[in-house]
Image (cartoon, grey):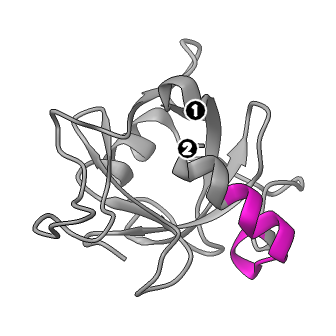
Amino acid sequence: MNRFLTTVSLLSMLGSGQVMAQTCTGNTIQFLTQAQISNLLNNRYACVGASPNAQWNELHQGGLVLDYKKGPSDPTDPSDTPSHPTGSYTVTGPTGGAQQAGTVTYNYGAGGTFGYNVTAPAGSGPPFHPGLYSFCTTTAGQNLAVTISPSHC
C-alpha cells in the first residue's frame, strides 16, 4: 500500500493531533490561491508527523513528489529521485479569479489521487512561509495538518 495511504490510515486510527489539528471549516477560513500554494510548496518538504520519524516526508520538486525515506545515501532505503518519484503533484486554480482557492492534487499512481485546498496558520498572511498548514480534502480522503519545511523532517 502506498506510504501516504498507510500514514493517513495509521494516524487516523491513533487519533494523532497532527491529523486532528486542521482548520478546514468555518466562515473565516481563507484558502491559499494557486500562486500561493505553488510558491509555498516549490522545493520544500511536506511532512505529517514530527522529526525525526515523520510519517510523510515528501519533497515537492518540479511537479514531482519525492519521498525522503532514510536519506539520499542510505544503502537500504534511499530517498526517491526524479527518475524514480513517489508520485506527482499539480496546483490548479479557478479561471474566474486569481484570489480564489487553489487546489493541490497528488497522484500516486495505483495509490490514488488526492486533492486539497490549503489554509494558512491563524494570523499569517502572504507571503506564506514554512510552518503548519491545513490540507483540506477536496476528494475522498482525510484533512491533514502538514508542516511545510525547507529541509526534510
Within the image, what quadrant is residue 13 found in?
A: bottom right
Count of numbered marks: 2
Vertical placement of residue 5 versus 26, above or below: above
Let me know if residue 53 is in the magenta part: no
Does residue 22 show up?
Answer: no
Residue at the image position 10 percent from the left and 68 percent from the top:
73
Left or right of 54: which side holds 11?
right
| Circle number at residue 14 | none
The part of the chain drawn in magenta is 8-19
Q: Between 22 and 98, which is closer to the camera in this rendering? A: 22
Mark 2, secondary structure of its residue: loop
Q: Between 122 and 104, which is closer to the camera in this rendering? A: 104
Within the image, what quadrant is residue 6 found in?
A: bottom right
Return the x and y of residue 23 as percentages of the image width and height. Answer: 77, 64
**Label 2–label 1 contact, CB within 8 A:** yes
Disc 2 marks a residue whose amino acid type is Asn
Does residue 104 show up?
Answer: yes
Q: Which residue is mark 1?
A: 111
The image quadrant where one finds the C terminus is bottom left
Farthest-out residue, top: 95
Q: Which residue is mark 2?
A: 2
Residue at the image position 50 percent from the left and 64 percent from the top:
125
Q: Within 10 angstroms of label 2, few (less than 14), some, or many (20 or more) residues? A: few
Vertical placement of residue 81 versus 103, above or below: below
Mark 1, secondary structure of its residue: helix
Disc 1 marks a residue whose amino acid type is Gly
Residue at the image position 61 percent from the left and 75 percent from the top:
123
User: Which of disc 1 and disc 2 is earlier in sequence?
Assistant: 2
Return the x and y of residue 51 as percentages of the image width and height. Answer: 43, 86
Residue at the image position 53 percent from the left and 69 percent from the top:
55
